[in-house]
Amino acid sequence: MKRKVLVILSNRWNPSQKARFVELDSDEKGNILKERLLRSRPTKPGYDEVWENDEGKTSLSSAFRLKRKYAHALERRRG
């Protein structure tokens, strides 16, 4: 079973810096199968998980501390 994960790379020290959005496809063990950089913020909720790094990193490979965002607006509702 594949999961779709959204990673938001933002900068809390410089809020005027534009956030970057990365979409990941992963398997049930958490291994990343595919990574795509999105052009803009997604508009519809369609992700199984949403994670954020607010340290001003510009790529997922340089970010080592991510925080899970529960009940995020872009997370798909279960139930």
Image (tube, helix red, strand yellow):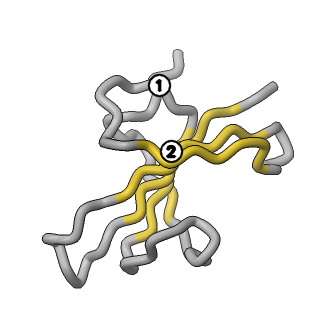
The label shown at residue 6 is 2
Residue underneath mark 1:
46
Q: How many marks?
A: 2
Q: Is residue 3 left or right of residue 36?
A: right
Taking the spot 42% from the left edge, 56% from the top edge, the residue there is 8
SS type, badge 1: loop
The percent position of residue 41, horizontal first and vertical second, equals 31, 41
Where's residue 73, x and y in %? 32, 36
Q: Residue at x 24, y 62 (%)?
A: 18
How packed is label 1: few (under 14 Cα within 10 Å), some, or many (20 or more)? Answer: some
Task: Tell me residue 32's x, y (percent).
Answer: 76, 49
Of callouts 1 and 2, which one flags the residue occurring earlier in the amino acid sequence?
2
Mark-to-mark CA distance, 1 and 2? 9 Å
Q: Is residue 26 above or below residue 55?
A: above
Label 2: how many residues lie within 10 Å, few (<14), some (14-19) or many (20+)? Answer: many
Q: Position of residue 78 (x, y in %)?
A: 52, 21
Left or right: 50 in relation to 44: right
| Front one among 59 and 64 | 59
* Residue sitting nearer the eye, 74 or 15: 15
Name the residue type under label 2. Leu
Quarter of the view holding residue 56: bottom left
Q: Quadrant of the N terminus?
A: top right
Instruction: Please give the name of the residue rendered at 37% of the width and 43% of the height, measured from the top-left corner.
Output: 39
Label 1 is placed on what type of residue?
A: Gly
Q: Residue furthest left?
A: 16
Give the structural element (helix, strand or loop) at label 2. strand
The one of 38 and 50 positioned closer to us in this rendering: 38
Q: Quadrant of residue 48?
A: top right
